[in-house]
Image: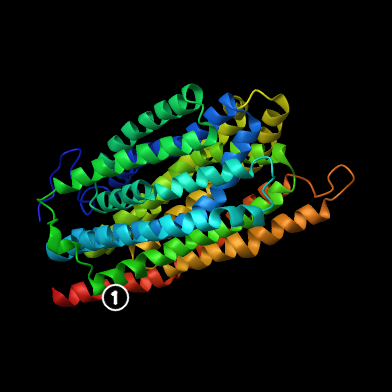
Amino acid sequence: MAASRGLFAAKDLTQGTPWKRIVEFAVPMLIGNIAQQLYNTADSIIVGRYIGDNALAAVGSAMPVLYLLLVLFAGIAVGAGVAVAQFFGARDREQLSRTIGTCITLTALSSAIIMVIGPAVSRPLLQFLNTPASIIDWCADYLNIFFLGIAGFSYYNIFAGILRGLGDSVSALVFLLAATALNVGLDILFVSQFGLGVPGVALATVLAQGISAALCFLKLRSMTENFDLNWSMLKPSRELTLTIMKLGLPSGLTQAIFSLAMVAVQSLINSFGEMVIACNVIVMRVDGFAMMPNFSFGAAMTTFAGQNIGAGRMDRVRQGSKQGTLIAVGVSATITVLLLLFGRHLMNVFTDTPELVALSMRMMRILALGYVAVAVTQCLTGVMRGAGDAMTPMWISLIAAVLLRVPTAYGLAYLTRSALYPNGRPESPFISLLVSWTLGAVITAVIFKRGAWRQRMLTLERKRVAET
């Protein structure tokens, strides 16, 4: 199986200096993740500027429900990326082709399910979360449009996961940048010119995501030197479906755990009123950009580990784990300093309300202290997933997001109730997030040193030695 060396081609991560290969792979992903974050950020900026702070709160309140119902695609995408990386590293063209075809079919079925379930449960979930009556209609409209156009989102993420598994982190980036520019243009057109309000930004996002998915598919169709993509390959394989689910569902469940924790904490945030809800939207948007290097290095470590384990290069996995984590920590430390120095300017992009800017900056200072911890967690769990151990990261997430974050948030809110803050201090949810990040990193580091993923590596290495 050939792997050309062009910028937009599949890349072999089993050769060369580990940290250089990881950085080369992670940087395009980082730019792509930033571009993807611009989708939601553009929505927030435009509704905040053109409609008002309540519209900004509406878009933010819709996010936890949206993430909760999209975790299935996150799981399939991760499972696809790991399986593709391992088969590509092993130079198994047949299994690689069948894996990609199976992913395409699974995504079609999953999209159809979400299109039916999403609109039916969105408003009840918003009501369950005590979403204020002043914004609940906007929230429901935003969600329903997004769910009805879910195919673009789901296929982009699946195709991007496949491309990353093949070592190509550049193509999806280019397509996403084009779609992001289109999304921003449509946001402004639909909101400022057509007066569509909050539903307009959802419609713009759906259209732009559909275009990015179509471009990714056309790219995959052109990569015939690495795999075959025809009608026969689209027939789901039971064996490969189970493999993808085994590799991906724990990651999907991890995202579900995070989403459930977000839903639980969002209910607490909603109790503080529209100002704190809008503050949370701003902080989470800025936080999303600050987290991008961590997520990018984590995904890069998954592909790097997957390809090298498939090729039997266990020595490179060990080297890459250390080097990639150190680089990610350095990048996160730099971002933390920049946020503390210039964060207020970022808050001003979303709103002109001085009280909202000051509140958002206060919460941002709390979260900024935890980004280095997240860098450690993302890189080490990325290696585990690349080695095929997707269960351990899931359990770590369960402990950090549910057993630590949610009780801490509600406990702090309860203990800080006063005449001025009858529902507790608004800092409580943000402190709880910092606590869960920090303790999660400690747990991850301990488990990584003696986890199941190491046993899998040792078994594969012994098998390779025996065969030679």
Who's the residue at 16% across and 62% down the image? 233
Q: On screen, 366 above or below 69?
A: above
Most foreground residue, 250 or 140: 140
Q: Is residue 330 visible?
A: no
Q: On screen, 68 above or below 134?
A: below
Residue 176 location in percent, x, y? 33, 37
Residue 260 location in percent, x, y? 57, 59
Tell me if 333 is positioned left or right of 211 in this view.
right
Residue at the disc numbered 1:
459
Tell me if 384 is positioned left or right of 286 in this view.
left
Residue 425 location in percent, x, y? 78, 46
Q: Look at label 1 and name its amino acid.
A: Thr
Most foreground residue, 184 or 279: 184
- In terms of image quadrants, where is residue 243? bottom left
Q: On screen, 181 above or below 317?
A: above
Residue 337 location in percent, x, y? 57, 34
